[in-house]
Image (tube, helix red, strand yellow):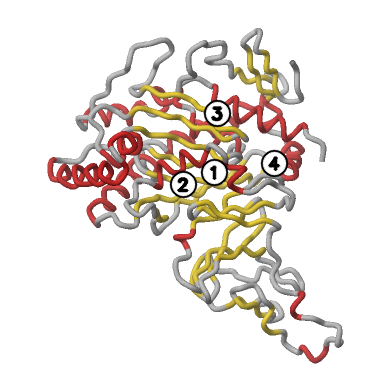
Amino acid sequence: MRDAFIIDDAREKKFLLNREALVSPSVLQAEMKKVFAKCWIYVGHASEIKAPGDFVTRRVTGRPIIFCRDHSGEIHCFFNTCRHRGAIVCTEPAGNRRGFRCIYHGWAYVNDGKLAGVPGADAYADTFDKNELGLRRPPRFESYRGFWFLCLDKDAPSLETYLGKAKDYMDLVLDQSPSGTMEILTGVQDYDIAANWKLMVENSVDDYHIPTTHSTWLAYMANSGVGIHVPQGEGLVLPTKGWAIDLGNGHFTTDNINFRGRPVAKWIPIYGEDAKPEMDEIRRELVERLGPDRANRVADTNRNLVIFPNLVINDGSSVTVRTFYPENAAKMHVSAWAFGPVEESETARARRLDAFLTFYGPGGFATPDDVEALELVQQGLANWEDDPWSEMSRGMGKESAQLNSDEHHLRIFWRRWNQLMEAAQ
């Protein structure tokens, strides 16, 4: 069957992607209306704004927003646009304030969004009503266990309905905390990639590229004493064994068995004997709280979870929350945060941050390699009119479960993306 952007032929075991989807400004324009304006989109985590008056500003779906707690502690999301003449209201990236004041004409807003003050208000007619001119909000704003999302479609299903089975994998991350409370660690990695945003979705779960793109990391792991044993079996190319799982609504995950000898809480590389007592204590607490089966599930598997369209929770070398947005058809902006239990010790937090930087950091083993790979893809796509199809059929037709090195999970994304793009307005 031929769609506008994909050839998805189960009988011939063939899946092809039209590369115009990765280069066209008109495709991006349609995405903003049919994907980003219809889906639940990640805004931020409650731990980023812990105290009353805390706020962060960022762009979500191309829109400047304020993510904040008001003076009573309630969490809000506002469009960061003055109701008077449209200027940005808050220009700081983060802080603590009781309100926000537009620098253009001085309109002032309380941190619950209400319009508090208008200079020269006596010049307005009696019909001027400040109560109608508070900061605008997205039509929908909901949370799941501290993760806050907005939706621009007022008629969309609830966030919990939208997340569906993805919640089970979010829970595996959150259960690492004795209280079920995880927090974004202070600091963010912000960077641009000269590539289409959808390539980051693919890269985030494409375990097929690890042996080639990240060969230096694998060698580093082996030299650090981590047992790298490639399991035997059809199509296996990785030192892990895992599967690609469809979670519905375009969400999907890899679900992998850990590297042999890897410690609890997913800190790579293995640290010395001095870390072992704390690792053992973390394991003991997990088993006592969750039972041995659930504890093993939390500690001895890792996953890269994609919440459609553009949120990734990596639960591997460290727990990482990553989101990315298109700047144009050939450029994206990426933000990534480390994520950990609120209760962990200073030494455990130090190991977590070290693992985060070692693999995902700007000078780490993964991020620079991935950035270069994606930019090389985008450069190669300049030939898309003469070489229009990407081959994405790996693993099709298998009777067994789809492996983490197959392309089943990539096809999950593209099928949902194509479904939305083909939908009527």
Disc 1 vs disc 2: Cβ atoms closer than 8 Å?
Answer: yes
**Residue at image point 58% right, 16% down:** 393
What type is the residue that disc 3 sits on?
A: Asp
Q: How crowded is mark 1: few (under 14 residues within 10 Å), some or many (20 or more)?
A: many
**Image quadrant containing the N terminus:** top right
**Residue furthest to the top:** 12
Amino acid type of disc 1? Leu
User: In the rendered image, which residue does mark 1 sit on?
Assistant: 311
Residue at x 62% of width, y 61% of height:
65
User: Residue at 65% across / 7% down in the picture?
Assistant: 12
Of tags 3 and 4, the one toward the viewer is: 3
Looking at the image, tell me whether mark 4 or mark 1 is earlier in sequence order.
4
Q: Quadrant of the C terminus?
A: top right
Q: Which of marks 2 and 4 is nearer the N terminus?
A: 4
| Type of amino acid under label 2 | Val
Question: Which residue was labeled with disc 2?
Answer: 321
Residue 374 vertical position relative to residue 37 in the rendered view, above or below:
above
Q: Earlier in the sequence, mark 1 or mark 2?
A: 1
